[in-house]
Image: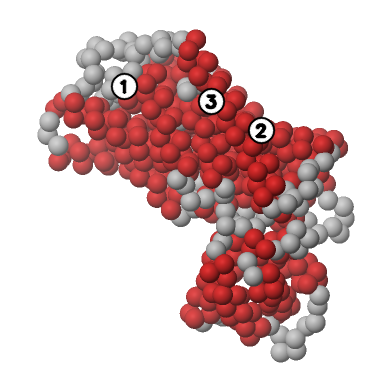
Amino acid sequence: MSQAIMDSVAEAPPISRPNLDGGNKPLHVIMFFAVLIGALGFAAFSILHDMNSVGEAPLATGTLVLLGLALIIALAFEFVNGFHDTANAVATVIYTHSLPPLFAVVWSGFWNFLGVATSAGAVAYGIVTLLPVELILQSGSSAGYAMIFALLLAAIIWNLATWAFGIPNSSSHALVGSIMGVGLANQALAPDGAATQGVNWEQVRKVFSALLFSPACGFVMAALLLIVMKILVKNKALYGEPKGNQPPPWWIRGLLIFTCTGVSFSHGGNDGQKGMGLIMLILIGAAPTAYALNRAMPESAMPAFIQSANTAQQVFTAHAGTTPVTMSDDQARKTVGAALRAQAVSSPETFDALAMLSGSIANSVQTYGSMKSVPAAAVPNVRTEMYLVADAIRVMGKADGFSADEKKALKTFQSGLYDGTRFIPTWVKVSVAIALGLGTMVGWKRIVVTVGEKIGKTHLTYAEGASAELVAMGTIGLAEQYGLPVSTTHVLSSGVAGAMAANKSGLQWSTLRAMGLAWVTTLPAAMLISGCLYVILRQVF
């Protein structure tokens, strides 16, 4: 792949290349490490504060070390994601001389920070649902830590490998492959007859569909947008190439800075969430009293939540067998867990179990009065029940057999369950945002050169850059609203190719083949790396 990228340089004529080597001064390095150390200290302080505020016992030394190591690796993934993926966002403003390279990178890092800090968290937990159910519910176990370490390290290794060759590659794609590898390895290691799940193929299909759609969407939509721009905007300056090192006219410069800002913000809001979901799993496993339930849910919301739980219980009971099955709460949890592993939640026995768990949740909240009042000993069971019922409702989807009112009641209950379990503390968002922002400022040059010089045979024009980034900004922002992870790299790099193809600028097929090969090999490579790491780490923990 590296030879293909290097050979592509010979295909393109000399261009007016921006100065990518200036600006790295000792003061900048000092500021960088000061922010990095401050962010790690802020995270450590926040964990201790959260644990003390709920009266959680101090962690054992071994658990504390594993927690710290897991958090550092998770933040390292976001750091690598920053300099690997976000470099795509700044390539257009740098190669059109709209912004100096150093300023562009800092600017993009800032907007990545804001994107993460203001994100809702839907993508974060969309990624988590790809994991085997038992590993999600036992994230504090040795298998849970092995899972976290294996999938994050595998994604980091693959991202660094493709970055070393200057190949734009998707961190989302690598993370999904890593999760699949861990799931398959988990299933392979399970004893005969053990209740375990390999890969949630239905959820993988949904997520992978979004990842598969993104490069095609980027190419086609950017090409169409450029054609529409040519019809509607007749000013020839928009379709020209930079002249020497001179910046474009002010209005074009403003457009390109706006699109760079939008892509950076959208990237933070989508890609930044992937690490947040995994960090929450780490925290829930290590300190469940502080993080398993959303203790910020107001007491005023509890009566409506209890009512929705009772209504859901009635719905499940109506669809259960004619003869009610008597089972304990533990049996009900095992029944629903087994149904989720099989992705078959519509049996009478499962409905009986769901009715029992819904009633148990309502009784727990009514007894304790609020989420923050649930005692430490009861937290694991309450969270497990809430997670199982919410995920069972998700798997049911639009299943036949439920009336419109019943579906509405279950959706309302599911929303309340998500509010109680799917939350991300502000300090987690800030820590991830800082890691992503700092990563944007490091190692960005390789990917920028590929996007700016090696996709097309001619210099990137203003209109081509704007078209690609407008499409990327819209696609990523829309995907976040639906909780779907998409690839900034795939959308933007294919958008540049699409715009250049529509403009008849010529494409460097050696680069596109290398990018296509990376796209095809990412999934199996990440699966192989994470699966092997998981097997090794299970022997360690």
Q: Residue at x 54, y 31 (%)?
A: 435
Left or right of 288 on screen, residue 249: left
* Local crowd size for mark 2, using a 10 Å CA cut-off: few (<14), some (14–19), many (≥20): some
Q: What residue is disc 1 on?
A: 99
> Mark 2 is on which residue type?
Ile
Which tag, 1 or 3, sits closer to the chain's start? Answer: 3
Q: CA distance from mark 1 to mark 2?
A: 32 Å
The relative height of residue 91 versus residue 14 in the rendered view (above or below) is below
- The disc placed on residue 73 is 2
Q: Which quarter of the image is occupied by the N terminus?
A: top right
Residue extending farthest left:
234
The relative height of residue 244 versus residue 522 in the rendered view (above or below) is above
* Local crowd size for mark 1, using a 10 Å CA cut-off: few (<14), some (14–19), many (≥20): many
Residue 318 image offset from top left, x and y in percent: 63, 85
Q: What residue is disc 3 on?
A: 35
Q: Residue at x 87, y 55 (%)?
A: 192
